Structure formats: C-alpha cells, structure tokens
Amino acid sequence: MSVYERRASLKEFYGVIFPSLLQLQKGITELEDRKQMEVCTREKSGIDVEREDECGICMEMNPKFVLPDCNHSMCLKCFRDWRERSQSCPFCRDSLKRTNSGDLWIFTDSSEIVDLPSILRENCRRLFMYIDKLPLIVPDHLYSM
C-alpha cells in the first residue's frame, strides 16, 4: 500500500471528483441503455433534422454552442456578435454577464452520441487521469527520519 495520497480542493472534489464517483456508483443499467438507444433512433422528418442543426439566429448550418445557464444554443459567431451588444440571452433574456466563450458547451446532436457504456468507460478513464494529476501529500513522518 502506498504512503502517498492525492490532495484535491473542495472545488475540485465537488466539481469533478464527486459527480464522477456518483456516476460510477449509479452505473448504467441495460434498461437505461435501451431507452437511450430508442431516443437516438427515433424517426424525425428531414425538416426537423435540418432545423435542429441550424443556428437559431443566423439560420446557418454552423456548429452550435450551448449557453451554460439557460441551455439555449447558437453558433459561436452569433454568440460573440450578440455578446458585444447585449448582456442577456437572445432567446430568454437570461443574464450573460459572467458567461465567456470558454464557458460555452459544444452542442452534441443525438446522432453523435456514442453508446452509454463507452461514455461511462471514458468518464472513468478521465477521472483516474485527473486524480493522478493531483498533487501528492507526503506524510510528515517520512521527513523526520
């Protein structure tokens, strides 16, 4: 057994480690996996699919980014243009005062979703990589020799 431990701040623990551990504990049941597959394979009309892929402001087929607070999506160009003129979401008027380009989420279409067990494995791998990068705690008794 190793005498070294890893140190994480409360922010790191509750922001990254704890949610990952909850996800691992919960696991993904076969029923949940089946439900997700049904959602992904649901029939949509061509118009619905096309409208889902376009930016709600400029109507272009650009990659979309999602606002973290209200979950509305738009392309990055429209976000930057809108952000210069206004401090609120163009769809619901929620505040954007503390939202920067780096805070945006990348919109993932249902056709881009990988199967849930693969996502769980990848999340687990990322959690362990994150924990490995935390600073080591060396016990005081090792220095007293």
Image (tube, rainbow, N blue to C red):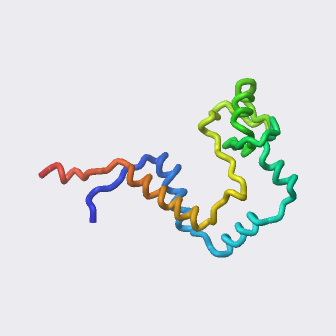
Name the residue: 68% across, 75% down: 31
* The quarter of the displayed image where residue 55 is located: top right
Left or right: where 45 falls relative to 142: right
Quadrant containing the N terminus is: bottom left
Task: Classify 58 as above or below 125.
Answer: above
Name the residue: 62% across, 33% down: 100
* The quarter of the displayed image where residue 94 is located: top right
The one of 21 and 109 positioned closer to us in this rendering: 109
Task: Classify 133 as above or below 117.
Answer: above
The one of 125 and 58 positioned closer to us in this rendering: 58
In the orientation shown, which residue stands out farthest toward the left? 145
Task: Tell me where residue 125 appears, x and y as whole percent.
Answer: 47, 60
Left or right: where 60 falls relative to 80: right
In the orientation shown, which residue stands out farthest toward the bottom? 30
Task: Tell me where residue 123 appears, x and y as whole percent.
Answer: 53, 59
* The quarter of the displayed image where residue 110 is located: bottom right
Task: Tell me where residue 71 appears, x and y as whole percent.
Answer: 72, 45
Name the residue: 50% across, 61% down: 124
Task: Tell me where residue 38 appears, x and y as whole percent.
Answer: 75, 69
Name the residue: 53% across, 60% down: 122
